[in-house]
Amino acid sequence: MVARRLADKSVQPVAFAFTNDNATWAEWKIGQYPAGRQQSAVIPLLMRAQEQDGWVSRASIEKVADMLGMAYIRVLEVATFYTQFQLQPVGTRAHVQVCGTTPCQLRGAEGLIEVCKSKIHHEPHHLNADGTMSWEEVECAGACVNAPMVTIFKDTYEDLTEDRLAEIIDAFAAGNGQTIKTGTQTERLNAAPEGGRVVLLEEATTYREKFVPPAPPPEAAPAPAAAAPAAVAPATPAAPLAPTTAGRPRDVVEESAPAIKGPSPDAKVSEAKAEGERKAADTAAKDNGEPNKAMRPNATGAESDASKVDGGKAPGKASADTPAADGTNTSVKKTRTIIAPKANPKEVNPVAEKGGDLLLFVAPEGAADDLKWISGVGPVLERRLNALGITKWSQIAALTPEQIDLVEGSLNFKGRIARDNWLAQAELLARGGEAEYIRVFGKKPR
């Protein structure tokens, strides 16, 4: 990292003072910051001091510190940190900053540095013989598209060649820098391609030209009668699209992945036959009460051959339980509770399948109500409620706290009924139907 230090004492001025105009400007600038934050004006004041003298001296740093009530070291830290501040005298007519970053290097920045060495001084940060010119190499100056380039004070000069930079330096040294065109030194437009534009070639139009139709010409001639429409040839049907494999992995073929091709006709027939045999065996087992031996070979009932294993005792018990006279196991306690009268045994009960109670409710006669009118009930939840025997709005409206706990426990959504206010909605629907619901709420629930 380059160490930035103040210039030698031999070139440091004894004192620094802003001109009257700059002093007025400095006071105005300080006043733009809120009370207690005036020290934030340190950078603008240092820049104004540099613009006045051409560089930042020790005396100017101390003057800015005194104006802002800052320690000298704090202002010195700012001045030495930012490379925009020149810490030693620069040319009074031009200080040439040559960009040396990669884009400019690739486009000939090294040649521009050699021009500065020959025209101004062999070393950077040194004045020429009459003190009017100086130069340095800097980091990116932000005109990479038009590389190589240099910055002189606040202007940039781009698309340079060695000969063009030599002409620019001679003009500034003679005091004619204002005659040099700033920006690109070629015929390009700003940062556009060198050969001219390649996009947006159409002529720009204003909003009015584009959207306001022109006024009709005066005394326009009447439009000629419309000619009879020509016969339209029948449209040619489009050719069928060729098969594509765009969605198929590149290394997958039908031979290595039969699922792409699908099962053969013989495989489909065999699978259908096997499925039919399984269904027939299952139906026969349900009709005669015997277990499906095609699915469970050698099964003889719910107890199967368990009595032959480990003396018939259950895991963790010392001996087998003694059956009662009627053949039941006396160790089994009958704890199951029937919440409602016995339902049709052919109905599917998800609660009973999990080892719970039988149907919680007996579905009333007649068509089922649309439970989805109750907010929070969708198609899936409606089917699950129907499976529990709840098919009517009136059933939900009449739920007791105990029944609510059973329903929420069976469907695993604790607190849902109270949270979505099912009972009030169901009571409204049971009393007046969908029309009453819309009259009260204005619309069907989402």
Image (cartoon, rainbow, N blue to C red):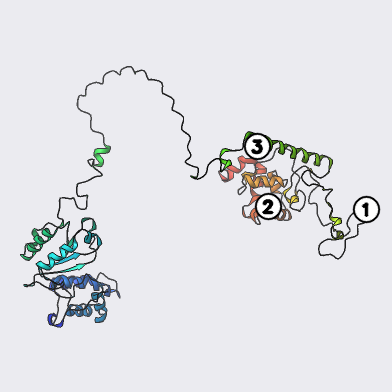
The residue at the point 30 percent across, 17 percent down is 227
Spatial distance from mark 3 to mark 1, Cα to Cα? 51 Å
Q: Which image quarter is the N terminus in?
A: bottom left
User: Can you give x and y, in whole percent of width and height, for residue 156 in the image?
Assistant: 17, 60
The quarter holding residue 208 reads top left
Q: Amino acid at mark 2?
A: Leu
- Tell which of 438 and 114 is nearer to you: 114
Which of the two marks, 2 or 1, is nearer to us in this view?
1
- Residue at 84 percent across and 55 percent down: it is 306
Residue at label 2?
A: 411
Whether tag 2 and tag 1 are in contact, CB under 8 A, the answer is no
Q: Quadrant for residue 2, please give it.
A: bottom left
Q: Secondary structure beneath disc 1?
A: loop
Q: Which mark is residue 267?
A: 3
Q: Nearer the viewer, mark 3 or mark 1?
A: 3
Name which residue lies at 86% across and 66% down.
Answer: 318
Sooner in the amino-acid sequence: mark 2 or mark 1: 1
Q: Do we see residue 200 in this rendering?
A: yes
Residue toward you, 92 or 43: 92
The numbered disc on residue 154 is none
**Residue 313 position in % (x across, y down):** 85, 61
Q: Amino acid at mark 3?
A: Ala
Residue tagged 1:
326
Of labels 3 and 2, earlier in sequence is 3
Report helix, strand or loop for mark 2: helix
Q: Nearer the viewer, mark 3 or mark 2?
A: 3
Q: Earlier in the sequence, mark 3 or mark 1?
A: 3
Question: Are circles 3 and 2 on residues that touch, CB within 8 Å?
Answer: no
**Helix, strand or loop status at disc 3:** helix
Nearer-the-camera pick, 397 or 412: 412
Question: Would residue 152 be visible to someone looking at this image?
Answer: no
Q: CA distance from mark 3 to mark 2?
A: 41 Å
